[in-house]
Image: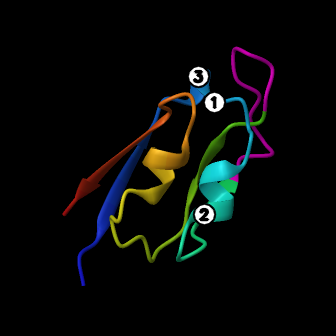
Amino acid sequence: MAKGILKFKVDKCKGCGLCIKYCPKQVLALDATVINALGYHPVGIAKEGCIGCGTCGLMCPDGVINVYQE
C-alpha cells in the first residue's frame, strides 16, 4: 500500500478539524502544543499509517495540507 507524506502550512490552519474527521486512517491530530499566527491550534501531527489518499487535503477549506505519495 502506498505511503503518504503530508506537508502542513501551519500558519494558515484554523483548526476546524475537517481533515481529522474525514481521514480514513485517523492519523491526523491538532497540535495542542502550538499556537499559529492566526491564534489557533493547527493540525500538524500525522501518525504512521497515512496511505496518501489525499482526502485531508480535499476537505481542508484553507488549503493547509499537501499530500505526496512516496
Q: Residue furthest top?
A: 37
Mark 1 crowdedness (10 Å alpha carbons): few <14, some 14-19, many ≥20: many
Query: Is 41 contained in the magenta span?
Result: no
Residue range in magenta is 30-40
Identify the residue at horizontal 61%, vertical 72% (top origin). 26
Give the residue drawn at x 58%, y 22%. Answer: 12
Residue at the outermost bottom position: 1
Give the number of the disc on residue 70: none
Q: Please give left or right for residue 42 compared with residue 64 in the image.
A: right
> How far apart are labels 1 and 2 at the CA level?
16 Å
- Is residue 38 highlighted in magenta? yes
Residue type at mark 3?
Lys
Q: Nearer the viewer, mark 3 or mark 2?
A: 2
Instruction: Report which residue position mark 1 lands on.
Output: 13
Callout 1–callout 3 Cβ contact below 8 Å: yes
Q: Residue at x 69, y 14 (%)?
A: 37
In the picture, the quarter occupied by the C terminus is bottom left
Of helix, strand and loop, which mostly describes the magenta segment? loop
Horizontal and vertical percent position of residue 29: 68, 57
- Specify whether 30 is left or right of 23: right
Q: Earlier in the sequence, mark 1 or mark 2?
A: 1
Quarter of the N terminus within the rendering: bottom left
**Residue identified by numbered label 2:** 22
The disc labelled 1 sits on which kind of residue? Cys
Q: Which element is circle 1 on?
A: loop
The answer to whether residue 53 is left or right of residue 14 is left
- Gap between marks 3 and 2 measured at Cα: 19 Å
Residue with the mark numbered 3 = 12
Q: Amino acid at mark 2?
A: Tyr
Residue at x-position 56% and y-position 66% = 23
